[in-house]
Amino acid sequence: MLLVAELVYKVRLPSASCQCYDKVAVDLGHETVNSMKKIAYFCIAGVILVGCHSEIASTTVEQGPAPELGGLSDDFDAPSKLSAWKHIDVTEGWNADQLQTFKADGGWLTMMPYTSTWYMDYRGPLVYKEVSGDFIVTTKLQTTNRAGTDAPHSLFSLGGLMIRSPRSDNAKTWQGGRENYVFLSLGCADQSGNYQFEVKTTSGGQSDLEKIPAAGGEAYLQIAKIGPNIICLHKQHGEWMVHKRYQRPDMPDTLQVGMTVYTDYPSASKLSPQQHNGTVIKTGNPDLIAKFDYVHFRRPKVPKGMNVAAASDGEILRILGDNGI
């Protein structure tokens, strides 16, 4: 038995398998060697089969493009890391910072916007990182009114996650009809003083949004891009839910992914989109504070052969939600 154990141990190293058999042949008689040959063959075959099965399982059941995305994640524990985030007003040359507050303190990022909005051709605040390929982005956030006591009261005052196609124009060459994005946010939509989720897809400057009640001002949000599939999820006081799915084959491989906040649509919409996009509106009734505990990025791991578009919510939750963090 000791010899068999030694044999199996050495067979695990392909270069040692012949050496192992030679050692046994020297030490034993002819009959014993014949018996040990049979054992060796079984042991070698078993080890090879186990090794092959393990390799097949690891390479075909799950797939995830490299490189990994953990380096993009931020727990907001060091204010110096904020410089790694890009601001859309700077990127596109608007020279209009619509964030009154943007700071990390105590492990939370606080964003408080001036009057601004995301709708059709209106472009609000977005703080983002560029991500190529498939990804999952997850956050935990809290939203309140500016007093910090309740849900916002100004209509369409929300904060959340956004993915957006980069634009080819800028503030000087801006043209309408070029906004393309998806976001999921938490705050007050069309019911003043009540918490709601808003999910919105905008394609070619045309927005389609949905609103549902939320169970309070704290939630986990997640957006996944898997090929053309954009999947939005949320979690409040329990299990993750698939919130909304979109097919967006128009979106490019590299997207702007990050955090958005916006508030006081009635005041913001008094300006034209182009005026709004280049203006810091210090009047109106802004009423939102959004706090982000973290933003984490990772690659999705999708079982080989899985049809993401046709998958049930249960199947989606096996790869996203808590399984996507």
Image (cartoon, helix red, strand yellow):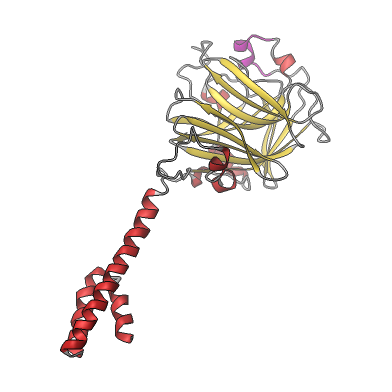
- In the picture, residue 231 is in which quadrant? top right
Viewer-side residue, 66 vs 256: 66
Q: Residue at x 74, y 15 (%)?
A: 266
Q: Residue at x 60, y 15 (%)?
A: 120
Q: Is residue 306 above or below residue 21?
A: above
Q: Residue at x 74, y 33 (%)?
A: 214
Q: Residue at x 54, y 46 (%)?
A: 318
Give coordinates of residue 42: x percent, y percent. Answer: 27, 72
Viewer-side residue, 314 vs 208: 314
Judge from the rendering whether residue 46 lies leftward or rightward of residue 287; answer left or right: left
Viewer-side residue, 227 vs 42: 42
Q: Is residue 126 magenta?
A: no
Image quadrant occupied by the N terminus: bottom left
Judge from the rendering whether residue 272 lies leftward or rightward of residue 163; answer left or right: right
Give coordinates of residue 314: x percent, y percent. Answer: 57, 42
Asked if one can make out residue 262 in the rendered structure from this viewpoint, the answer is yes
- In the picture, residue 14 is in which quadrant? bottom left
Q: Is residue 224 above or below residue 49?
A: above
Q: Which residues are magenta?
A: 271-280
